[in-house]
Every structure is written in C-alpha cells, then in structure tokens.
Amino acid sequence: MKSSLQKLFLVLFFIPLNVLADWTLNLRQGATPISQEIYNMHMVTLWVVTIIGILVFAVMFWSIFHHRKSKGAKAAKFSHSTTVEIIWTIIPTIIIISLAIPATKLLIKMDDTSESAITIKATGSQWKWKYDYLDGVGEGITIYSNLDDKSKEVSVRDSGLNPMEYENYLMDVDEPIVLPVGTKIRILTTAQDVIHAWWVPDLGWKRDAIPGFINDNWAVIEKPGTYRGKCAEICGAGHGYMPIVVKAVSMEDYTAWVDEKMIAQEASKNTSDIVLSMEELMTKGQKIYKAQCLVCHQANGEGMRGAFPAIAGSSIAIESDNRLRHIHQIIYGKGLMPAFGEQLSDVDIASIVTFTRNSWGNNTGDIIQAKEVSEARKKPNIITAGDLNKEKMTSAKKIDGLAQAK
Ligand SMILES: [Cu+2]
C-alpha cells in the first residue's frame, strides 16, 4: 500500500509527466541566432534564480526546524550585524551585474538593424496585416495577409465544424509573407487604426505596431520552414483573426517568388478593361467577399448588430441610385470600415459590388463592370460629402432645438 504522501507525490509529479508527455513549459529556442541567445540568457537566469531559491529556502526551513520552540530554542538578542549586511549587499549586487552585462549586450544587439539586406514594413489594421517590401530584393511588393478561408468557415457560429479537427485554426492566412533564409531582414512595425503587435515566437521578439510610430527589429531565419504568429495586442472584435505566417525559403526560391509576384502585381493594376459575365462576377465576388468582408459582415451578409451593418437589405446595396455610393464605400471606406481602394483592383471591386447587390435577397440584377469602378475612382468621394451634409443637418437641428428650448 502506498502512503498518502507517496500518492500525493505521484499526483504532483509522475502522473502529469506521463499523461502530458507533449506538454512543454519552457521558452522556445526559435529559428534565429537572436532567439537562441534569448533562450540561452533565459536558461542562465533561470538556473541562477533556481539555485538562489533552493539555497534561501533550504537555510530558512533548516533554521525554522532546528530552532523551533519545542526544542527549547532561545531568540538571539542582537539586532544588527555589519558584516552580514555588507555580505548580503555585495553578493546580490555581483549577481545582478553579472546578469545585466550580457542581457544589455543582447538587447543592444537585438536593436541593431544596420546592414539589413531586405526591409519590410508590417502594418496592422482591423483585422489583417499588410506587408510592404521596402528595400532589397522584392522591393515594391505589397501583400495583404487575411485569415484563411477555412478558419473563417469554422469560426462562423453554428457552422457545425469542429475547430479541434482543424490543425491551423486561426493560425493560417490566405497569403503568407515569404522571406529568404540566412539573410538579415529588417522588419518595421506600425499600424493604421489602433495598436496591434507583431509577434512570431520563433523570431524571438514581439513588437507593438502603433499608429504614427515605426518600430524596427530584425531577424535572420536559419532554417526554411513555416513560422506562425499572431497579433499580440487586443485590437477589437477580430483580434483573434489576424494571424501571421512567415514562409522562409532559400534565396533562389525567394527570387523566383519575387519575379512571379511582380508580374502578378503588375497585371492586377490594369484591370479596368476586363469585362466579365454575371456568373464570373458573382464567383469572383464571393471569393473576395470571403477574404475581405466576411469577418465583419458575416457569411449571411447580416453583419454584427451594433458594430457592423448588414448588407442584406441595406439601401446602399439595393437602391439603383446608390451604385456610386456603394462603390465609393469600398474604395474609400467609412467609419470602422477600412478603404479597400488601394488593396483591390477595379475588377475585384466590380465583382464584390455585383456579388453583394445580388446575394442574400438583394436581387437588384445589377452588373457592375471594372470600367464603372475605374470611373468612380476619378470622382470625388461621395461618402464624405454625404457625411458632411449629414453633420451640417444635425448641427442645424441642434441649433433649432436650442432656439426652441429658449
Ligand atoms: Cu491586432
């Protein structure tokens, strides 16, 4: 028969170790020299504090046990000991300084972004990441990283799909950032609307992305692979929907990707002459809606009450007088809704407008072609003009109200 102490010991130590074999507690070693150095620094510090903890508690428990009252211990009468005070000041000071020196060196190294071969800028917005390749091979590329379609499908309430069965649930994107291995990459972080934070644990650092500020960091990824991260600053309802995926590839693969991406990017700039059938517009529109609009406006176009208005049955999406307003709302954004004009091509916007005007009971039959979007881009923003009028009207009403109250 095991004693109850033995049982307690088993519960506390052995059973969790067996059952949770995959369960790890420690910091990750990561994929960059810096993340490895952070890990080493962390381990040294951990051992130092563990040894101090063991020594201090050992002396404390030993003293309590051996000088207990039942053994007839008598309290000493002295109140000060200069020697002891000097010792307990000097020893911790030496320990702290010997930890602070390597830690400071490491922090300085982490901040040294000089001689980077490639610079990218990560801009957080509600709720996606935009990456601009600013310098080095790939300069001029822009990527928008949205939550992947599968995660969106699974995340819809009552979807009937089990998130536990989907390996990268909320950890995958439609388009990852591609970076070469063995190259010093400077990563700037900033934001467009509220504070976000760019965090890929394997790179060893996490940095706030603040509107109006640019923080810079760097990484040299050693091994090719996929590294996942997340926005690490609560940034609103869709905070959990903005993962980060970094695909690290060899330099050759990277240059090949850059060439391909450049061609695709160039092609997407000039789409105003493309004419599609209703069916083609609907299929394309549905795909883009899923990637860009679904998180806020939902799969059924009904939005989220109080935060994101419904598109189903909304006057902007069904009245024929509102076609331009509808297009402008997507190009220029409105309130919480970001501007998509830069991100989406003419044909993309045309498809999305056609799709939303002909879905969920919005049966306008309207077909919007890229040409109409390209022309709408040349017209002054009708949304802000409308808002200004509305503001004027409300202030006029207020003044009326005040006058009447008097
Ligand atoms: Cu965020």
Image: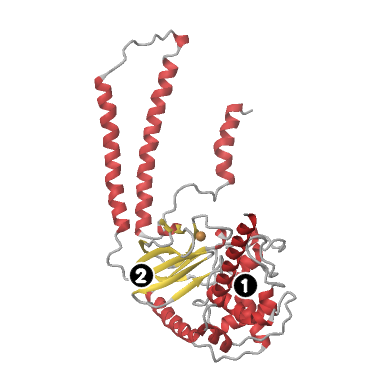
Is residue 103 positioned above or below 400 on the image? above
The disc placed on residue 397 is none
Amino acid type at mark 1: Lys
Going by the picture, which residue comes out furthest to the front? 406
Say which element carries label 1: helix
- The image position of residue 362, as x and y in percent, is 72, 77
Instruction: Tell me if mark 2 has few (under 14), some (14-19) or many (20+) residues whose alpha carbon lies within 10 angstroms of its own.
Output: many
Q: Is residue 2 left or right of residue 96?
A: right
Report whether residue 345 is seen: yes
Q: Residue at x 66, y 62 (%)?
A: 304
Is residue 274 positioned above or below 23 on the image? below
The residues tagged by marks 1 and 2 sit, at their Cα atoms, a distance apart of 30 Å
The answer as to whether callout 2 falls within 8 Å of ligand 1 is no
Q: Which residue is mark 2?
A: 119
Q: Which of disc 2 and disc 1 is earlier in sequence?
A: 2
- The image position of residue 233, as x and y in percent, is 49, 55
Q: Is residue 102 left or right of residue 232?
A: left
Amino acid type at mark 2: Thr
Nearer to the camera, 292 or 346: 346
Colour setting: secondary structure
Q: Residue at x 41, y 21 (%)?
A: 62
Report whether residue 221 is seen: no
Nearer to the camera, 299 or 393: 393
- The image position of residue 171, as x and y in percent, is 55, 62
- Quadrant of the rendering where the N terminus is positioned: top right
Q: Which residue is mark 1?
A: 290
